[in-house]
Image (cartoon, grey):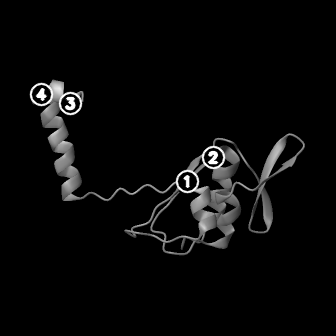
Amino acid sequence: LGQKDLIRKLEIALENGHTILIENLGETIDAVLMPVIQRASIKRGSKLFIKLGDKDCDFHPDFRLYLHTKLSNPHYPPEIQAETTLINFTVTMAGLEDQLLNLVVEKERPDLASL
């Protein structure tokens, strides 16, 4: 969020239906992103618009926003959690052992794997 041209890049992605990734978020999310996260669109005629800062931007339905954090257990406000899907990509030794065990069982004993 520290990039000075983030709003301009976000505006271009919104209008053209591109995907944008915002990396290294902290515990707080900039208020200018809230209408985008909530997809608070305004319909004028046959076009959709989203308020981005102080201006209305065209909203393309193919637009996607991905938010990335390095925090192991982020605590975002309920309104953020309700509008987003949180995916934890943390890899643990126990998780890797389970995956490896499943692969071995599928190869060695397919009858057990089907249970």
What residue type is disc 3 on?
Ala
Depth order, front residue of 57/44: 44
Depth order, front residue of 104/12: 104
Q: Position of residue 88 (x, y in %)?
A: 39, 57
What residue type is disc 4 on?
Arg
The residue that mark 2 highlights is 63
From the viewer's perspective, is residue 10 above or below residue 24?
Answer: above
The residue that mark 3 highlights is 113
In contact (CB < 8 Å): disc 1 and disc 2: yes
Of helix, strand and loop, which one carries label 3? helix
Q: CA distance from mark 2 to mark 3?
A: 40 Å
Q: Quadrant of the C terminus?
A: top left
What residue type is disc 1 on?
Ile
**Residue 2 quadrant:** bottom right
The residue that mark 1 highlights is 20
Q: CA distance from mark 1 to mark 3?
A: 40 Å
If you read the primary sequence from the N terminus, does the residue marked by circle 1 or circle 3 appear first? 1
Query: What residue lies at 85% left-to-right and 48% top-to-bottom?
Result: 43
Judge whether residue 6 can be spotted in this image.
no
The nearer-to-camera label among 1 and 3 is 3
Of helix, strand and loop, which one carries label 2? loop
From the viewer's perspective, is residue 43 above or below residue 11?
Answer: above
In contact (CB < 8 Å): disc 3 and disc 4: yes
Q: CA distance from mark 1 to mark 2?
A: 8 Å
Q: Residue 109 got which mark?
A: 4
In contact (CB < 8 Å): disc 2 and disc 4: no
The nearer-to-camera label among 2 and 4 is 4
If you read the primary sequence from the N terminus, does the residue marked by circle 1 or circle 2 appear first? 1
In contact (CB < 8 Å): disc 1 and disc 4: no
Q: Residue furthest right?
A: 45
Disc 3 packing (10 Å; few <14; some 14–19; many ≥20):
few
